[in-house]
Image (cartoon, rainbow, N blue to C red):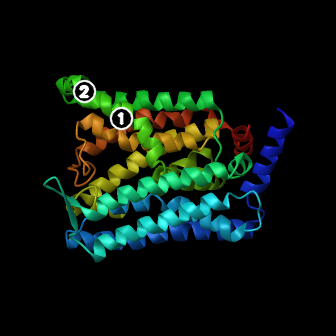
Amino acid sequence: MNQETKMNENEYESSALPADIPTQRKQLLLFLLIAYGVTYAMGLLTWYGNTISADLGAFPNAQMFYPAAGVMLAYLITRRRDSLMPKCFYICFLFVTVVMLLCAVCAIAMPGQTLDLNGLSIPLWSMLSQYLLIGGTILCWITLLISGKNRRAAYGLRWQKGKASLICILVFLALYFGRAVLAYLADGQSDVVLAIVQDPATWVYLLVTPLNFFMAFAPFFGEEYGWRYYLQPIMQKRFGLRGGVLLLGVAWGIWHVFLDFFFYTTPDRGLIMTISQIITCVTLGIFFAWAYMKTGNIWVPVILHFLNNNLGPVMVSDYSADVLQNQQVTWGMIPAALLINGILFGLFLLAKEFRKSPCLMQESMLK
């Protein structure tokens, strides 16, 4: 390890960790007020928007920004004198968060707005949120890069352990596609798998997916910087490496509750979706936590989260903008989801990374 690397790691330790217990508590309170308080306040608007059949497409995108916004606001308030803080990036991300939030509010305040494109009626606010997301992502990339490597390292924003990171991503892809194939085969739909493989749209979509990440990483970073970078170490320190991750998965799942009832499906199926969401968040959260603990690279769970959300259209051969909305879920899907996800992702809870002490784990992530 050279002197510069050692200096950067020391800077990481002194800058990224709270100095005292009162500061930690203040940061946690601020985080919760944004990550959950704003989410649930906007959730009430989601409920109201559902009752008036408003376009709710802007709400999921905006909500994904809130966890990281909570972390950044907490750090800007409690560490405003830290010269290593990437303030430019933080302020930019908070600005984009506010813009996305306002777009969602406008969808409720001015419902029914559409644009006519080649004879197609496109919901205005959903489309606008996509453009804002892309523009905001580009601004975030610019401010992140000009922050400099020392500031990125000090606040968990650097890319590191490239080989291990690539392995984690490839393992996830194998498990993700393997899970889908198993589900189809279990239902006797091997012909569907063959049709997906033979469809040219599948391969075109897969080819453009990496480019799409660079145009839309911000919301996925918004969740992972909040859940994995900030809250996971706190939960693990309090409840243990395994218990902390399991409880974080439950907290992550409950965070989706308004979207589960009023966006992803219809209110009468909301409870089913919520339980399914918790199962998904707990099991995927185990794998995401393992990947982050193994690499100390926050960009790995960001990429995994992006892939999980964006490869779904491939497996159902539906590339429409509203593929995630009004899903048909049943109680019969719950046992299969629990079994398959529990085996494929949950078993990573037995990995060696979960057998280390929290102190040793912190040290290994910094190397």
The local secondary structure at tag 1 comes to helix
Above or below, 295 relative to 271 = above
Q: Within 10 Å of the Cα at label 2, are there few (<14), some (14-19), or many (20+) other Cα atoms?
A: few
Drawn side of residue 366 relative to residue 336, left or right: right
Precedes in sequence: disc 1 or disc 2: 2
Drawn side of residue 266 relative to residue 346, left or right: left
Q: Which mark is residue 340?
A: 1
Place of residue 187 in the rendered image (x, y in percent of width and height, measured from the top left): 20, 30
Drawn side of residue 325 relative to residue 92, left or right: left
Q: Which mark is residue 200?
A: 2
At 70% from the left and 69% from the top, the residue drawn is 78
For marks 1 and 2, give the CA distance.
Answer: 28 Å
**Which residue type carries mark 2?**
Pro
Q: Within 10 Å of the Cα at label 1, are there few (<14), some (14-19), or many (20+) other Cα atoms?
A: some
Give the residue at the far bottom of this rendering: 109
The local secondary structure at tag 2 comes to helix
Q: Which mark is residue 250?
A: none
| Quadrant position of the N terminus in the picture | top right
At 58% from the left and 51% from the top, the residue drawn is 142
Q: Is residue 24 in view?
A: yes
